Amino acid sequence: MSVGDLLVTLESVLESKPYIIRLELIDRSVNMLKARLFIDADLFIQIYRNDRFDTTNFVLIHNRQRIFARDQLGDEWHRHTPADPELHDKSEEGRKPVSLTEFLDEVEIILAEMNLP
């Protein structure tokens, strides 16, 4: 996954996920991207990718608090579960690499379980 790949995926997400109301590109360079996909004013997904350092972060944020995330540094992934968003889950499931689309599928399940829009 690269910054270019993520940009393409972000555009397709806007068309395929009707609950995403807005895309905000916060920062972008050749090697780095930081963006937000807004679901609601206080509910969004923050996306960060740095090709130079091979780092990816997908974070679901509600009321300024992380409620779910998947992070990657090099070949290693971990996740932050809704049950304990501060914990680094390095279980087999937590270490599973995910694309932005797969992360959004997980987010949809979590939003439904938490009864969020």
Image (cartoon, rainbow, N blue to C red):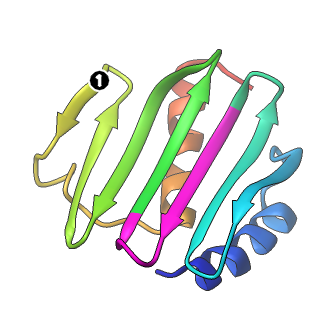
Q: Say few, some or many: other residues with alpha carbon within 10 Å of mark 1 (under 14 / 14 to 19 / 20 or more).
A: some
- Say if 17 sits above or below 19 in the image: below
From the viewer's perspective, is 44 left or right of 53? right
Residue at image coords 61%, 19%: 64
Could you tell me which secondary element the residue under label 1 belongs to? Answer: strand
Quarter of the image that includes the C terminus: top right
**Magenta segment: does it hold 39?**
no
| Residue 48 part of the magenta segment | yes
Q: Name the residue nearer the viewer: 83 or 112.
A: 83
The location of residue 76, given as percent across then percent down, is 19, 64
Predominant secondary structure, magenta span:
strand
Q: Position of residue 81 (x, y in %)?
A: 32, 31
Reply above or below: 98 against 36. Answer: below
The answer to which quarter of the image holds residue 115 is top right
Q: Position of residue 35 (x, y in %)?
A: 69, 54
> Which amino acid lies under the numbered mark 1 shown in the image of this protein?
Glu
Tell me which residue sits at (44%, 53%) in the image.
Answer: 57
Residue at which label 1 appears: 86
Residue placed most toward the observer, 114 or 54: 54
Image: magenta residue range: 44-55
For the view shown, which residue lies furthest in the left direction? 91
Picture quadrant where residue 53 is located:
bottom left
The residue sitting at 10% across, 46% down in the picture is 91
Camera-side residue of 19 and 26: 26
